[in-house]
Each structure stands twice: as C-alpha cells, then as structure tokens.
Image (cartoon, rainbow, N blue to C red):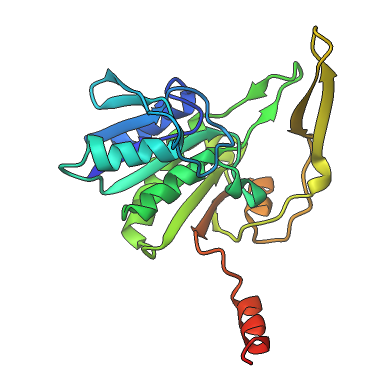
Amino acid sequence: MRILITNDDGINAPGLAVLQKIAGELSDDVWTVAPETDQSGASHSLSLHEPMRMRQVDSQVYAVKGTPTDCIIMGVRFVLRDKPPDLVLSGVNAGQNMADDVTYSGTIAGAFEGNLLGVPSIALSLAYSFDKDKTRELKWQTPLTLGGDLIARLLDTGWSDDVVLNINFPDRDPGAVEGTLITQQGRRNQDSLTIKDRMDPRGNPYYWLGFRRGNSIPEEGTDLWAIYSGRISVTPLNLDLTHEAVARDLAADFKN
C-alpha cells in the first residue's frame, strides 16, 4: 500500500513526524508532501496567482511553498504520477478539528483533496490543554499508540468513495482513552470567538482573531461530545453541502 501524507502545520511540525511513524506501521511505501510553513486555517485554498516551489527534504519527503491542497495535488499528480497513492493521511494536527472547524481546517482540506482525486483519505487531529504556565501540552503518544490500529480497522471495514474520515484524539494518555465513537459533526458556541484590537509601534491598529478557552455544550453523539468525554471521534464527512430537505421544499415552491 502506497501512502501519501500531508498536514497544515508545516514540514517541521511534530504531528507530521507522528503521522510518518503511524503510516510506517501500515506500509513501507510512505511519501510526505507537506507545506513549507504553517498553513493552519487555510481551508481548501489553492495557490493560483503565484508559482509553487517544492524542495526535496529527504528520501520520499518534500516541502511545498503552498497550502495542504497544493501539497496533495503535487503529491498525487506530480510526485507520484506514475503510481498514485492508495491512501491519503493528513495530520496529525496540533489541536482538534471538529464542529465548525471542518470548514476552516487545512488538515481536513488536505484529506478532501485526496478524496476528490480518487484516493481514500483520512484527517487526524489531537486535542490539547494548557499547563499552569499556559503552555500547550500535547499527548502525541496517544495518536502514536492508537492511530495505526484504528486506521487499519477502518481500512478493513471500508467506507463510501465520497466520504472523508475525520479522526480526533482526546486530550488523554493512551490508557485513559474511553474507546472510539462514530460521531456526527457538532456545533460550537460562537460566543467564544474574540477579536483583540491592538496598536503597532507606528500607531496603526491591528487585530487578532481567537477563541476563549472553555467547552461548548454539545449534543450527545457529536464529535465535541466524544472528545469531551475522553473518546476518539471518527466523523464521516462529505463535500456535498446541499441541505436536501430545504432543497426539496424550495423545489416544490418553484415548480411553477
């Protein structure tokens, strides 16, 4: 099995090294094409107005000056054009990608692009917390320990060709994880969104977008609920954003 991996945190991110190890448990034919720099929040964007630069970092490892979507296109259609991958893995993202995050996430976009190019694709992310010094604490051992077996099980089960699997690992040590749950996409409390307005040394205003710390109150069975309760969340996602019920109602009104 040939595996292509990418991420949105950049070629030097620790989560990419974790994913390389996970992929190595599944295959000895693993290729990496990842962004040169952090592309968090890039969503499904493409580089259309400037050329992409790509450099070889190591054997079967490449860095692209572009987005995760660019990386998957370069990987499938250029680097591996003579023998396309059998699986795309994107991550492991430093931070959960759930609920509304799925529309912003470059990690998930990389998996979506793999799916659009006809390759089964999985996105992987890891929730984290902050220690008393307000430093991020990421339990990389959790996806490293549990990720390979989970992906192998999902591959054995199989899923629809038009679906991307979105895996999120909870902020727990491997032995404390409460199992795996197949979930629905949740919704965040948007009151946590903040804008910090500041002034630079030249007297010009600038702004930081961010989120207040704290949990939403999710419905049981959603991705947020699973992570808050210490479970691994696996959410099947689809790029078809059509709301079928509303489409039927509108079509009925527009028959004449």
In the image, residue 20 above or below residue 248:
above
Q: Residue furthest top?
A: 201
Image coordinates of residue 137 in percent, x first then y, are 63, 24
**Res. 167 in view:** yes
Give the answer, above or below, for where 127 lies relative to 234: above
* In the displayed structure image, the side of residue 18 where residue 139 appears, left or right: right
Quadrant of the image containing the N terminus: top left
- Where residue 244 appears, as percent x and y from the top left, is 59, 76
Q: Is residue 209 left or right of residue 191?
A: left
Q: How many marks?
A: 0
Image location (x, y in percent) of residue 84? 22, 45
Residue at 26%, 35% (x, y): give it. Answer: 30
Most distant residue in the bottom direction: 256
Query: Is residue 3 something one can see in this rendering?
Result: no
Q: Quadrant of residue 78?
A: top left
Q: Nearer the viewer, residue 151 or 83?
A: 83
Q: Nearer the viewer, residue 186 or 245?
A: 245
Task: Kindly identify the residue that appears in the image at 52 percent across and 34 percent down.
Answer: 93
Q: Could you tell me residue 134's position as x and y percent?
A: 74, 20
Q: Residue at x 28, y 33 (%)?
A: 31
Name which residue lies at 47% across and 25% down. 10
From the image, which quarter does the C terminus lie in?
A: bottom right
| 146 and 237: which is toward the camera | 237
Residue 95 falls left or right of residue 47: right
